[in-house]
Image: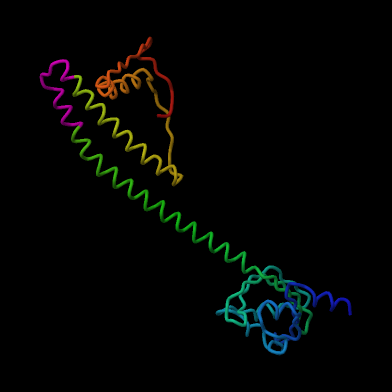
Amino acid sequence: NRYRELVDNLHNIVFQYDEQGRLSYVNPAWADTLGFSATESLDHPLEAFLYGDDSVSDLLGTRFGKALSHQEIQLRDADGERRWFDLSLRSSGAGGVGLLYEITAKKEEHQRLERLVRMTETATNAKSRFLATMSHEIRTPISGVIGMTELLLETELDPTQRSYAETLRGSGQALLVIIDEILDFSKLEADKLNLHSQRVAPARIICDVLSLLGHKAERKGISLNSTISEYNKQFEGIP
């Protein structure tokens, strides 16, 4: 009849099973998808075609009139390869009818994305550990340089020597800030960065920049100057 013709032309697998769970009918999509002919499949339980240790006996025993939808199962094809399906069932007392919609490509893509996520997380964690170690290794000698510069500034120095020592101290402190910012970038990637607001004096930042770059500019014959009207004026900001 026309309903049988419709089922025979479906791309999804339609099957019937008896009260023992044995296949009593499979449409042509069964052979097209799994590679098993109807002759090889009929009178065999659906479980004979499962991949691995899955079981569907409880599902096939669903009580009369009860419908089951979107149950994922794994079947093996004629080459022994795993195929994923979305299974829907409706019992009819002495057996029932089922529909299998293949989702192998969807499952494989999902698994591929999961592997990529795990690889990304592993790489991110490794980078974070490296940055933390690098920060510690660099911070220790820089702290020593800053400490010795502080001691140097407590001695008698002429104005030029004091200017050089203060620039050295400022450069060391700026490097420590850069190291902290590198760690902040790592925290940002891990979604663990906490922003905080504090008072910032733009004029002091400008003076620090001029102090750091002034000697290099002077060697090139460049003069760096600034005009600041309110040196101590501060603003609220995120450094």
234 versus 104 height, above or below: above
Span shown in magenta: 146-162
In this view, which residue lies farthest toward the top? 229
Q: Would residue 238 be counted in the magenta stretch?
A: no
- Residue 179 horizontal/vertical position (percent): 32, 38
Q: Residue at x 42, y 20 (%)?
A: 235
Q: Nearer the viewer, residue 114 or 238?
A: 114
* The quadrant where residue 60 appears: bottom right
Q: Tell me: 60 left or right of 204.
A: right
Q: Nearer the viewer, residue 159 or 49?
A: 159
- Residue 216 horizontal/vertical position (percent): 26, 24
Q: Nearer the viewer, residue 133 or 116?
A: 116
Q: Residue at x 30, y 30 (%)?
A: 174
- Residue 202 horizontal/vertical position (percent): 38, 20
In this view, which residue lies farthest toward the left? 156
Q: Tell me: 13 left or right of 154.
A: right
* The quadrant where residue 65 appears: bottom right
232 versus 186 height, above or below: above
224 versus 174 height, above or below: above
Give the quadrant of the C terminus: top left
Q: Residue at x 70, y 81 (%)?
A: 31
- Residue 153 horizontal/vertical position (percent): 16, 23
Give the quadrant of the N terminus: bottom right
